[in-house]
Amino acid sequence: MNERGYTVRFMKRVEEVLPASWMWKVSDRFRGGIPDLEILNNAITVRIEFKVDKHKLERLQIIEINALRRAGATVLVVRFLNKERNFSIENGRDTFTSESYRSGNKAADGAAELIAQQYL
């Protein structure tokens, strides 16, 4: 599955788990490096950058993510790894993996559930 497929599935699962949440799929063509998705729930905002397999953050993405974190934003990097059930979530301090979170669901569903529980 490609990044778009994971993102769509992730967003559908967030809508199921947090029906009152608001999401914005960012597509800013004028300013690069902005995280892919913004989720607002109960006055808490989380920004998420998605990566699939071995794709790494680009230099501009690292700069923007670090700037947002310095400003107090919660920014997560969600990586969907080699198979549809494996993922990791990096928050700038810690990394959670599908090994430490066994939802039994596909990676996008498990990542959405974990973020809803831990951050929203």
Image (spheres, rainbow, N blue to C red):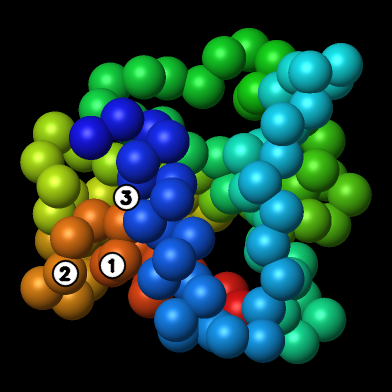
**Residues packed near mark 3 inside 10 Å, few (<14), some (14 to 19) or many (20 plus):** many
Under mark 2, the amino acid is: Asn
In the picture, which quadrant includes the N terminus? top left
Mark 2 or 3, nearer chain start:
3
Q: CA distance from mark 2 to mark 1?
A: 6 Å
Mark 3 or 1, nearer chain start:
3
Q: Is residue 45 visible?
A: yes
Q: Name the foreground residue: 16 vs 117.
A: 16
Asked if the residue at tag 1 contacts the one at tag 2, i.e. Cβ–Cβ closer than 8 Å, the answer is yes
User: Quick one: SS at disc 3?
Assistant: strand
Q: CA distance from mark 2 to mark 3?
A: 14 Å
The residue indicated by pointer 1 is: 110
Q: Name the foreground residue: 49 vs 95.
A: 49
The residue indicated by pointer 3 is: 88
Would you say 35 lies left or right of 113 here? right
Question: Which quadrant of the figure has residue 51?
Answer: top left
Where is residue 9 shown, x and y percent of the image?
36, 56
Q: Is residue 3 above or below residue 47?
A: above
The residue indicated by pointer 2 is: 105
Identity of the residue drawn at 35% across and 62% down: 111
Identity of the residue drawn at 72% across and 71% down: 22
Identity of the residue drawn at 58% across and 85% down: 19
Where is residue 76 shown, x and y percent of the image?
56, 51
Mark 2 or 1, nearer chain start:
2
Under mark 3, the amino acid is: Ser
